[in-house]
Image (cartoon, rainbow, N blue to C red):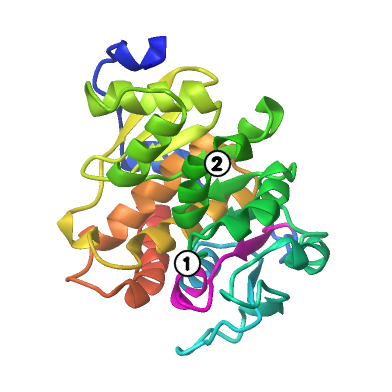
Amino acid sequence: MAGPLSSLSFPAGEPYGREQARRSLPVYGAESHKYSHGTLVVTGGSRRYSGAPLLAGTAALRAGAGVVVVCVPSSTEILCSVPMALIVHRLPEEPAQGTFSRQSLEAWRRECRRATALVLGPGMDNPPALDPFLAEALATPLPKVVDADALNRMAATPSLLPPPFICRNMVLTPHEGEAARLEQAFGLASQGSRESRTMALARRTGCVVLWKGPGTLVADPADSRLTTNGSGNPRLATAGSGDVLAGVIGAFLAQGLPPAEAARLGAFLHGLAADQNPPMLADEMPAAVTRALVSLMSQ
């Protein structure tokens, strides 16, 4: 049965554009260093999907994170060039499927000791064997972006949703299909305006929700603020684009922005990169994000 929030209607989201994004940019003094720019741990990948966490990690570096560590299962094949500045660590895995499992946790905890934020999910694959690992990763009291297969596992196992004091520092980044699965998992109706559905999901989970799509929406349950992103175009609808977005948001979380502001700024910058360039592969988007960031800072 649908929860009471799912039928509420909300006005169109407040526009979020260039001026709002410029005001949200992190500011650093002359004596800043790599650790003051944050340490992000991206956790994803699997034997089947190797590229997604590397796209997220590269995008995070390009968006200004000081240190980025990408954790992948040990049998993940890296079939692409990776920036030498990106730290890639292989963790013990569930051997039959090549995914994270309970055996991954001790090594993963070590990687997170200096982390200021996390990205969870890109390319993780979707077996139930992930759940013990995700239960601890999601409950870690660090700001985090929860994307892709981490969202799918949460939809399959709603008990993975951590306590409210953890959720208020989480950004969920579903597309339409992932959002519908989450709605079903948490007793919400997949009907009504996208605005009302986004806010209902945010309030039900206690997390900031970034609902990807034309006019990406960001809902903050803490103050019921709903914004509509003012950048981007259909060229963003390409494989790997969402992984890049997760990395950009993660970079801003790592640099200390509050979750809702990191989500809004990340979505705007990601869209601006598409607006300023011809059609791109996701591989090309991280560099375009840097160019968009420079243009945003200079105008």
**Coordinates of residue 288 in the picture (x, y in percent):** 34, 69
Q: Is residue 186 visible?
A: yes
**Front in this rendered view, residue 55 or 184:** 184
Which residue is outermost to the front?
96
- Whether residue 37 appears in magenta in the rendering, the answer is yes
The disc placed on residue 157 is 2
**Which quadrant: the N terminus?**
top left
What amino acid is at disc 1? Answer: Gly
Q: Secondary structure at mark 2?
A: loop
What residue is at 73 percent from the left and 57 percent from the top?
A: 36
**Real-space Cα separation, disc 1 to disc 2, in angstroms:** 18 Å
Q: Is residue 27 visible?
A: no
**Coordinates of residue 39 in the picture (x, y in percent):** 70, 61
What residue is at 61 percent from the left and 35 percent from the top?
A: 159
What residue is at 25 percent from the left and 47 percent from the top?
A: 231
**Front in this rendered view, residue 298 or 219:** 219
Q: Residues within 10 Å of mark 2 (few under 14, many from 20)?
A: some
**Coordinates of residue 62 in the picture (x, y in percent):** 49, 68
Q: Secondary structure at mark 1?
A: loop
Give the label, 1 or 2, closer to the camera.
Answer: 2
Q: Which residue is mark 1?
A: 123
**Coordinates of residue 258 in the picture (x, y in percent):** 59, 37
Q: How many circles with numbers are drawn on the protein?
A: 2
Q: Which is more N-terminal, label 2 or label 1?
A: 1
**Front in this rendered view, residue 135 or 21:** 135
Region in magenta: 36-54
Above or below residue 234? Residue 167 is above
**Quadrant hosting residue 51:** bottom left
